[in-house]
Image: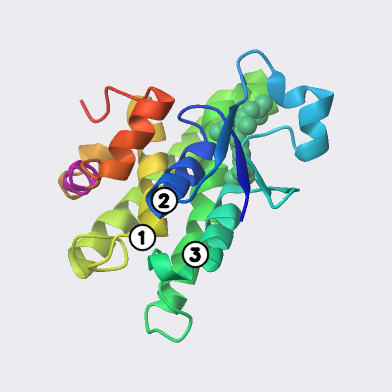
């Protein structure tokens, strides 16, 4: 199995990068300088016509969309146990949570972070205010799940949705709706970032300073 990840530090590619490290599979990581606009380079657009990161080239074929890539990796490396098995009781809850994050939290994050770029800058503050409400309600949902389920979003086992959640919670660090203002979510973050795979990811991507 051959993997080539096109990534930019701390962005949506971060969770895929983390998962590849957690899985311990060989892969090549190629930096895309999104500040310089490399994601709009014609050669990159051939791999990912949306002009966004991540792109994961799997056995020579390029694919995008963070959550789909993580689901694909989980399927290809089922022995990792990073997602519940198809016949397990947790499978439906996992699917629901992964799609909830992809459909609700990720678009709201994009709206908050790119309101003035993707849309009319004059309307940006209204877009951000709505996005903030949506993001906060997801943090409330996560906090309630942890109270009910235990150490991780789906219960006792760390998995794919936790990597996704940590990436998105980190994005909120400079927002008025920072996830770790909730004590349960702060504990969750502090527990997970001690994992060797997160430490390795942070070294490779140069991530630091969160949570302060
Ligand atoms: N739905 C996409 C969103 C990807 C996305 O928005 N990536 C951002 C970085 S977090 C990006 O490439 N931004 C550069 C740009 O839009 O020009 C996914 O989940 O992969």
Estimate the spatial distance between the alpha carbons at disc 3 and disc 1, rounded to whole Å: 13 Å
- Residue extending farthest to the top is 36
The residue that label 1 is drawn on is: 159
The residue that label 3 is drawn on is 77
Q: Decide which of 158, 196 is in the foreground and name it.
A: 196
Q: Secondary structure at mark 2?
A: loop
Q: How would you rate the neighbour count of disc 2 (Cα within 10 Å): few for under 14, some for 14-19, many for 20 or more?
A: few
Q: Determine whether the residue tagged by mark 3 lies in a helix, strand or loop.
A: loop
Q: Is residue 100 magenta?
A: no
Q: Earlier in the sequence, mark 2 or mark 3?
A: 2
Q: Which sits in the foreground, 150 or 17? A: 17
Q: Are marks 3 and 1 in contact (CB under 8 Å)?
A: no
Answer yes or no: is residue 176 visible.
no
Is residue 189 located in the magenta-colored stretch of the structure?
yes
Q: CA distance from mark 2 to mark 3?
A: 10 Å
Determine whether 150 is above or below 16 in the image. below
Res 203 → quadrant: top left
User: Start and end of the magenta stretch?
Assistant: 185-191
Task: Residue 128: tell me if it is visible.
Answer: yes
Q: Position of residue 176 (x, y in %)?
A: 34, 29
Q: Which residue is mark 2?
A: 24
Asked if 210 appears above or below 191 in the picture, the reply is above
Q: Quadrant of ligand 1?
A: top right
Instruction: Check the picture and name the quadrant holding the N terminus.
Output: bottom right
């Amino acid at each position: 199995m051959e993997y080539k990840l096109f990534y930019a530090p701390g962005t949506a590619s971060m969770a895929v990068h983390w998962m590849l490290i957690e899985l311990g599979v060989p892969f090549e990581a190629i930096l895309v300088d999104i500040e310089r606009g490399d994601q709009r380079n014609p050669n990159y657009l051939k791999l990912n016509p949306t002009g966004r990161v991540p792109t994961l080239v799997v056995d020579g074929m390029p694919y995008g969309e963070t959550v789909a890539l993580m689901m694909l990796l989980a399927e290809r490396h089922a022995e990792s146990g990073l997602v519940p098995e198809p016949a397990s009781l947790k499978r439906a809850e996992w699917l629901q949570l992964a799609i909830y994050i992809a459909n609700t939290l990720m678009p709201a994050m994009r709206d908050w972070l790119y309101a003035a770029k993707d849309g009319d800058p004059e309307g940006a503050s209204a877009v951000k205010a709505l996005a903030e409400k949506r993001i906060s309600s997801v943090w409330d949902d996560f906090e309630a799940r942890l109270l009910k389920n235990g150490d991780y979003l789906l219960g006792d086992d760390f998995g794919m949705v936790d990597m996704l959640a940590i990436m998105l919670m980190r994005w909120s660090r400079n927002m008025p709706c920072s996830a770790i203002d909730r004590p349960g979510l702060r504990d969750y973050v502090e527990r997970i970032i001690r994992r060797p795979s997160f430490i390795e990811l942070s070294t490779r991507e140069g991530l630091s300073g969160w949570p302060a």
